[in-house]
Amino acid sequence: MIKDKKAFGNFLREMIRQTGISQSAFYSAVEITKPYFYDILSGKVNPPPPEIQYKMLDALAADEHMRRTFLNLAAQGRDEVPADIAAKIKANPKKLDAVSELLGI
């Protein structure tokens, strides 16, 4: 499967546009550099790691639907489990056995 490396960047760009803040105010609030920000938008780099993803979501005051879509697209771009799900697994390690059993792994 070929992943669309621009899907996350396009979604992030639209979220920023909808909030009405400038892109420079956004990447300053998230404390990332301008070049890194534009590399994220263009798909030149993978979506940022979870700690930056959460900073981005806070800066955008995203609703639950937007958060879920954002985290899922970031996970797809990083080829990882979504950050919110990974955090729940980490917080409940005993439940990981039940999930593993359910999935047959």
Image (cartoon, rainbow, N blue to C red):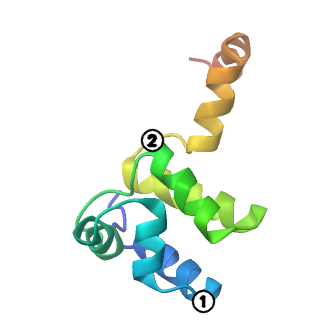
Examine the rendered structure and indicate whether residue 88 appears above or below residue 91.
below
Tag of residue 37: none
Q: Give percent across and percent down for residue 36.
A: 26, 65
Disc 2 or 1, which lies upstream in sequence?
Answer: 1
User: Label 2 sits on what residue type?
Assistant: Glu
Q: Give percent across and percent down for residue 49.
A: 41, 46
Quadrant assignment, res 44: bottom left
Examine the rendered structure and indicate whether residue 104 appears above or below residue 9.
above
Residue at the image point whose x is 39% and y is 53% from the top: 48
Q: Give percent across and percent down for residue 17.
A: 55, 88
Q: Nearer the viewer, mark 2 or mark 1?
A: 1
Secondary structure beneath dot 2 equals loop
Quadrant assignment, res 42: bottom left
Residue at the image point whose x is 67% and y is 61% from the top: 67
Which residue has dot 2 on it?
80
Residue at the image point whose x is 32% and y is 56% from the top: 46
Q: Residue furthest right?
A: 64
Examine the rendered structure and indicate whether residue 14 appears above or below residue 26.
below
Is residue 72 at least partly visible in the picture? no
Left or right of 19, for residue 12: left
Query: In the image shown, does 76 or 12 lie closer to the viewer?
Result: 12
Secondary structure beneath dot 1 equals loop
Tag of residue 20: 1
Viewport quadrant of the C terminus: top right
Dot 2, crowdedness within 10 Å: few (<14), some or many (≥20)? few
Cα–Cα span, label 2 and label 1: 30 Å
Viewport quadrant of the N terminus: bottom left
Dot 1, crowdedness within 10 Å: few (<14), some or many (≥20)? few
User: Label 1 sits on what residue type?
Assistant: Gly
